[in-house]
Amino acid sequence: MKRVAILGPSTFSEEATRHFLGEDFTYVSYKLISEVFNATSSGETDLGVIPIENTLEGSVHLHVDWLVHEVDLPIRAEWVFPIDMNLIGYPAPEGRTDESNPFGYIRKVLSHHVVPAQCSRFMKQYLSGAEFEQVSSTAEGVRIVSSLQDPSVAAIGTAIASTNYGVPMLQKEIQDHKDNMTRFLLVGKEASELKPSEDMKTTILVTLPEDYPGALHQVLSAFAWRRINLSKIESKPTKKKLGTYYFYIDIAGSLDSVLLPSAIQEIEAIGCQVRILGCYPSYPYTN
Ligand SMILES: O=C(O)C(=O)Cc1ccccc1
């Protein structure tokens, strides 16, 4: 069975990956996302799973940075999964109940750094007196809460973490939007056989030549006149020189098509550097 590195166990990454890949894989849990990248890169696992983008927050920049700067792992698939955030902790100690705010006794909330933006309304209303502390995963927050057994410290995480660590669910589904989706990437050195998808995507990084006015316009027009659809374009610092950027571009379509390789050739011809991060199937959410 193929081995898949995930941030886990009992995380949103695990929920999303089991839903997508099923049980014909061996899941190997790592505490840090850097360990997920490194395990996949070193061959300890065949594949790795990276949460890359959320409906509300956009890209998880730290993870994009790893993909671009630290490893050379092609993207093999992407899928979307709905995320239900839950407040997990212990009930109010006796004498600490507050009519106006049932969670007013909570002083600290532990979770993954992408979480507060996804439950900002709930946190503002009920947890404004609590300090947020970032931990390596939502499950790690629940694990710490279970070890402290202190009602003033709570976590935000998955229902499965509440069950597995034996910490009560205080409030279900506290995310701002019911359709709170996260996009996950499957990365790996070798292609894996996956279910067919109607949608293929290609992700490229483009570095513009210096001193070439209008270079970005030229890049975009290489796609535009071929009627190639871009689903995302983001500029990011190259990290080599202040003020220099590359563009992270998601393209609807496959490198097997005639048009896309010719668009890339045209971009290279004007002096841009192009790195292909992957050409892969994309899956919408189906339950
Ligand atoms: O910490 C987790 O549970 C993760 O898998 C990372 C994450 C956190 C919040 C939304 C999606 C993924």
Image (spheres, rainbow, N blue to C red):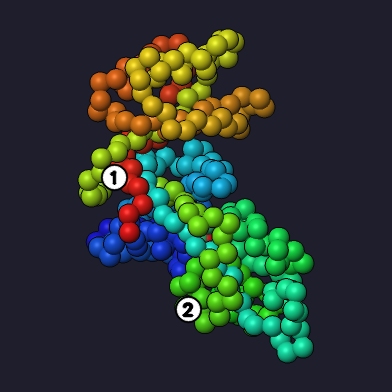
Q: Nearer the viewer, residue 271 or 120?
A: 120
> Of tags 1 and 2, which is closer to the observer?
2
Judge from the rendering whether residue 37 lies leftward or rightward of residue 78; answer left or right.
right
In the rendered image, the quadrant that contains the C terminus is bottom left
Image coords of residue 115 (percent x, y):
59, 57
First-in-chain label (1 vs 2): 2
x and y percentages locating residue 234 in the rendered image: 53, 32
Q: Quadrant of the N terminus?
A: bottom left
From the top left corner, tell me how far across and down residue 249 is, in percent: 45, 30
Q: Quadrant of residue 87?
A: bottom right
Question: Element at badge 1?
Answer: loop
Per the image, label 2 sits on a secondary structure element best described as: helix
> Residue 18's x, y, as percent?
34, 62
Q: Residue at x 47, y 25 (%)?
A: 206
Whether residue 22 is situated above or below residue 162 in the rendered picture: above
Residue kind at label 1, given as amino acid type: Glu
Q: Is residue 132 visible?
A: no
Residue type, mark 2 in image: Thr
Residue at x 43%, y 24% (from the top left corner): 274
Residue count near mark 2 (Cα–Cα under 10 Å), binned few <14, some 14–19, many ≥20: few
Residue at 46%, 17% (x, y): give it: 219
Looking at the image, which residue sits at the far bottom? 94
Q: Quadrant of residue 5?
A: bottom left
Mark 1 = which residue? 190
